Amino acid sequence: MTITDVKIRKTFDEGPMKAVASVTFDNELALHDVKVIYAKEKYFVVMPSRKNPDGTYRDIVHPISSVMRETLEKAVVEAYFDALNAQTVATEEQN
């Protein structure tokens, strides 16, 4: 399965959640609400989840292998930094 697109839907300046992304696989399947988190001096992704009746959360989709998790995390975090760079360039061009 190949990641064919990553879109950063929203970015945040405050708090540990830095962005929300959508990821497309093989131009056939979209995964929404992947979150980019910055905590403990590193960036990582959190899968979409659902709140259980007992107040805990459970991922509704997740990579099975560590290789796929690393591939997904790398693609989403890179897209996040690309989006930040594009925002910086756009701001500089306006000024």
Image (spheres, grey):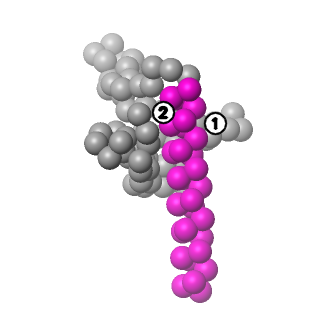
Mark identifier at residue 46? 2
**Cα–Cα span, label 1 and label 2:** 12 Å
The rendered magenta stretch, by its main secondary structure, is classed as helix
**Front disc: 1 or 2:** 2
Q: Position of residue 34 (x, y in %)?
A: 42, 39
Q: Amino acid at mark 1?
A: Ala
Residue at the bottom extreme? 95
Quadrant of the snapshot with the N terminus: top left
Decide which of 6, 94 is in the foreground and name it: 6
Disc 2 secondary structure class? strand
Decide if residue 32 is in sight here: no
Q: Amino acid at mark 2?
A: Val
Q: Position of residue 63 (x, y in %)?
A: 45, 25
- Mark 2 Cα shell of 10 Å, populated few (<14), some (14-19), many (≥20): some
Q: Earlier in the sequence, mark 1 or mark 2?
A: 1
Rendered view: 47 above or below 90: above
Rendered view: 89 above or below 9: below
Mark identifier at residue 75? none
Quadrant of the snapshot with the C terminus: bottom right
Mark identifier at residue 39? 1
Decide if residue 54 is in sight here: yes
The verdict on residue 92 being magenta is yes
Asked which quadrant contains residue 74, the reply is top right
Disc 1 secondary structure class? strand
Asked which quadrant contains residue 52, the reply is top left
Q: What's the magenta region?
A: 67-95
Is residue 66 shown left or right of residue 59? right
The verdict on residue 74 being magenta is yes
Q: Position of residue 48 (x, y in %)?
A: 37, 32
Which residue appears at 53% of the width and 60% of the height?
A: 83
